[in-house]
Amino acid sequence: MSALANKPRLVEGFEHFSLYWDPKWGKYSAKIGPGDYYVACDDMVITTVLGSCISACIYDPVIGMGGVNHFMLPPSDTRGESSRSLRYGLFAMEQLINGLMRFGSQRRDMQVKISGGGKILAGMTDIGRQNIDFVTRYIRDEGLNLLASDVGGTSARRLVYLPLEGRMLVNKLGHQEDKRLALVERAFGVQVEHELDDNNDVELF
């Protein structure tokens, strides 16, 4: 059977993604970046690259579906108020959870794995630690089932998730990727800050 014959369906709401054939896995792949999330109902892989950002991978064995998000909390303001930053993390988690619940998933059945949160450049603010603290607290407070985590450290990571199996694979990257990835994440943090400023009277979920 040719690769094109088993191309996965794009779930409603994800039509803007372009799937590509990944010969390493013998499956089609969706690549997500900061601020993205993806839910899959067919056999494929979801990939991303993480520095200080976090990805939560959630699988529901009851409905046989899974998905991944990719997010970073922007820095808290100088007064130490973290509520604005936390709003973005909450939004990112609820996006993925609600994406699965649209297909009948229940929170009690969700199995969570997390990765990322590295401090990839010396001298940088440790946004990675803030991201780790947020996502672990969120999972605990929501009563979700955390099965595995690969977080912290000083390396960037390439994440591959098999959403119909709930299988998360992580590969630590060499430091030659760090500066480029840090620039991408810094630009994303600025973008989120602007979005929060522009919508300071809007509830994100």
Image (cartoon, rainbow, N blue to C red):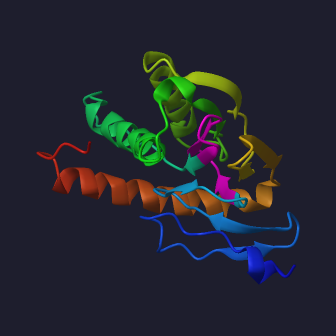
Q: Residue at x 26, y 56 (%)?
A: 195
Pick the front one: 73 or 61: 61
Q: Is residue 23 above or below residue 194?
A: below
Q: Is residue 53 above or below residue 183?
A: above
Q: Position of residue 68 (x, y in %)?
A: 58, 48
Quadrant for the C terminus in the image: top left
Judged by its main secondary structure, the magenta piece is: strand
Q: Position of residue 202 (x, y in %)?
A: 15, 47
In this picture, residue 26 sits left or right of residue 58:
right
Q: Position of residue 15 (x, y in %)?
A: 47, 73
Q: Residue at x 11, y 45 (%)?
A: 201
Q: Is residue 172 above or below residue 18?
A: above
Q: Residue at x 59, y 41 (%)?
A: 63
Q: Position of residue 11 (x, y in %)?
A: 51, 63
Quadrant for the N terminus in the image: bottom right
Q: Quadrant of residue 44?
A: bottom right
In this picture, residue 28 sits left or right of residue 75:
right
User: Which residues fall within the magenta stretch?
Assistant: 46-66
Q: Residue furthest left?
A: 201
Residue 74 visible from this viewpoint: no
Q: Quadrant of residue 41?
A: bottom right
In the image, residue 56 lies in the stretch drawn in magenta:
yes
In this picture, residue 153 sits left or right of residue 171:
left
Q: Is residue 24 above or below residue 104?
A: below
In the image, residue 173 lies in the stretch drawn in magenta:
no
